Amino acid sequence: ARPVPGGAQLRIPGISPFVTPNGDFYRVDTALVVPKVDANAWRLRIHGKGVTRPTTFTFDDLLRRELIERNITLTCVSNEVGGPYVGNARWIGVRLADLLAECGVRPPSKGGPADQLVARSVDGMTIGSPVDDVMDGRDAMLAVGMNGQPLPFEHGFPVRMLVPGLYGYVSACKWIKDIELTTFDAYDPYWVKRKWARRAPIKTESRIDTPKPFARPKAGTVMVAGVAWAQHRGIDKVEVRVDDGAWQEARLASEDTVDTWRQWSFPWQATSGGHTLTVRATDRTGRVQTAKRTQTIPDGASGRHSVVVTVD
Ligand SMILES: Nc1nc2c(c(=O)[nH]1)N[C@H]1C(S)=C(S)[C@@H](COP(=O)(O)O)O[C@H]1N2
Ligand SMILES: [Mo]
């Protein structure tokens, strides 16, 4: 990937770094014991409805292909507003759409019979993604590396799937071993059987990283800062509100790509007493992050993040 633009990383204490180090990257899965897969014995089978050339790939088959490197921000559908289950990493892997096309897969928009791609992991997880999303030109990939290192065991070694713009439970199968082309009518994957939505694009969200809840900053200029994300749409604006005041525009860090989160900052002239800081983002489709609070189930939490502080 081209270098991250210098202006994407603001120098503000307490803000989430643009690239989340592997050791700090959130982990969400059902595995009680992290699978330890032998890359030499690993196989990926692609088969199912409309797959005219079913194929089994080895790890070497993938490494021999052209590798792409992309910064992609991943988010969990179970992330509460203001929560920690979001991270941004630099992933290396192969283009999934190319592999599928070689196997004869056509997306439904081009007349293909399968609208759902079901990924299966070695530990029995099933994750379903819309074939149209995977093949619409976005950087859906089978990743083998994360931030310049082999994929850590916790994050899916040797190979995991990623589709920019979709929550992890409908896109990001770790320890993947099988891809089946099917339909949404014919098969419900693991979390859908448990009442989560069949389709789940990531909602436009923003988070205040600093100051922390119940912090006691001194009166004067206080840097309010955080991250905002609307993967595959892009963030166009972030605004901050103090108590019930007017929305004021924050400064946005440079954009890396529409698939990555964006840092923001707002120098607040803080006056003594208790205050509530609230943030909202606007994505490139013009949609303003809604104030309407919803639960995480079935398709992700919505609402605005607020932080209460006492200025000394
Ligand atoms: N095999 C497997 N893959 C999985 C999961 C899982 O439980 N098992 N969880 C998914 C969910 S819900 C999310 S949000 C992402 C999290 O990826 P990470 O742990 O690398 O952050 O992985 C996805 N892939
Ligand atoms: Mo998730």
Image: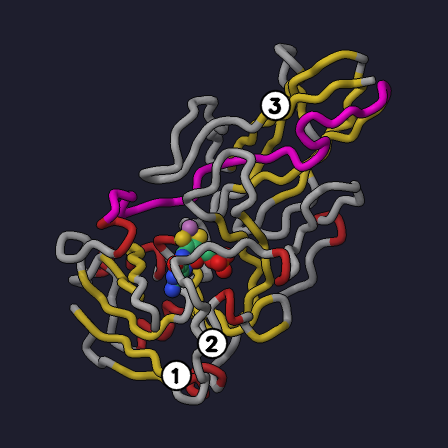
User: In whole angstroms, how far apart are the C-alphas of marks 2 and 1?
Assistant: 8 Å
Q: Amino acid at mark 3?
A: Thr
Q: CA distance from mark 1 to mark 3?
A: 47 Å
Among numbered discs 2 and 1, the one appearing first in the sequence:
1
Q: Is residue 210 shown in magenta?
A: yes
Q: Quadrant of the N terminus?
A: bottom right
Looking at the image, the residue that sits furthest to the left is 186
Give the SS element for disc 1: loop
x and y, in percent, of residue 306 in the image:
59, 25
Percent x, y for residue 210?
A: 71, 34
The segment highlighted magenta reads 194-220
Name the quadrant where ligand 1 sits: bottom left
CB atoms of marks 1 and 3 within 8 Å:
no
Residue 137: which quarter of the image? Answer: bottom left
Residue beneath label 3, please?
A: 278
Dot 1 amino acid type: Trp
| Residue for badge 1 | 42
Name the residue nearer the viewer: 137 or 59: 59
- Name the image quarter holding the C terminus: top right
Asked if the beta carbon under badge 2 is closer than 8 A to the nearest atom of ligand 1, the reply is no
Does any portion of residue 198 appear in the rendered image? yes
